[in-house]
Image (cartoon, rainbow, N blue to C red):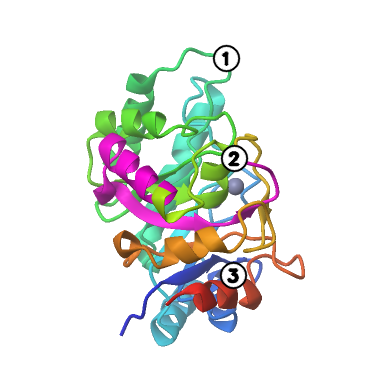
Amino acid sequence: MTSFPIIGAHVSIARGFSGAAARAHAIGAVALQMFSKSPHQWGSAKEDPEDVAKFVRYVDAYHIGPRYFHASYLLNLADEGRIGKASATTLVNELVLAPKLGVRGSVVHVGSWKGAEPDFDRLADVVRDILKKTPEEAMFIMENSGTRKIGVTLEDIGALAARVKSPRFKVCLDTCHLFTAGYDIRTKDALDAFIKKFEEIVGMERLELWHVNDSRDPFGSYRDRHENIGEGALGKEPFRILVNHSAMKEIPFVLETPGFDGGGPDKKNVEILNGLAR
Ligand SMILES: [Zn+2]
Ligand SMILES: [Zn+2]
């Protein structure tokens, strides 16, 4: 039985995928996100069949799902050279691995134009090629950006979604990124207005998950530094409104907060969010 809201967390794979599942369970998360390998290095995950089997057993026993990968921070799918090629290959390998772990897909920071003219047609071709090379059940999940990169506006996300034209193209909305990119979600009215805009420009059916993070930086600052829930410029109230919103009932909320002891999303952040739910 699923209870709402679905509060999840980004968890470390330092002790393998099974270690990540164990950590999620230990902090009370019922959904998880993890890297498939170090996010700061190129190359693909090494698959340990024993660890994969253990992960599948754990998430089943602990009822942890949905599950997501967060793609490498090095990726820039808009790059037209070597970096772009390596980015696509890395993501293809990750999305091929995903179904083996019962992972729904990868949350992706798409990249930046790096001075080049925005070319959504070319970028969409890159994404479509990645989808073509990967299992039908694996989702490409574009995350909104809090800094001036691709995805800082809903128009960016809508432009790519419209060109990729695939039900496998999904979206992750990060509360910290929306806030620093100048999208106000602090009151019920503001959130409703934002949801209406999202519906018009992107489409609610594309919303796969939320990243729930408070922000160390002010509204419209174009910075990206996460803070524990209630400890930042957003405060607790926007999260109370969000996790109780009727349109978000089945959408998972995944924490990427620094943690009260600095060790990443922790039990306290999960408990704060659960405490805000009615
Ligand atoms: Zn995020
Ligand atoms: Zn962030």
Q: Amino acid at mark 2?
A: Thr
Q: Residue at horizontal 69%, vertical 66%?
A: 259
Report the residue at 62% width, 34% height from top: 222
C-alpha distance separating marks 3 and 1: 38 Å
- Spatial separation of the CA atoms under disc 1 and disc 2: 22 Å
Quadrant of the image occupied by residue 213: bottom right
Tag 3, which secondary structure? helix
Q: Is residue 85 above or below residue 48?
A: above
SS type, badge 2: helix
Q: Which residue does the numbered mark 3 point to in the structure image?
A: 16
Crowd band around label 1 with a 10 angstrom C-alpha radius: few (<14), some (14–19), many (20+): few
Instruction: Please say if 131 is above or below 262.
Output: above
Question: Which is nearer the N-term, disc 1 or disc 2?
Answer: 1
Q: Indicate the position of residue 189 as horizontal and vertical percent values.
A: 40, 50
Residue 129: horizontal and vertical position, in percent?
31, 33
Instruction: Report the magenta residues as a range.
Output: 190-219
Amino acid at circle 3: Gly
Q: Which residue is under mark 2?
A: 180
Nearer the N terminus, badge 3 or badge 2?
3
- Near-viewer residue (60 or 174): 174
Q: Residue at x 37, y 75 (%)?
A: 4
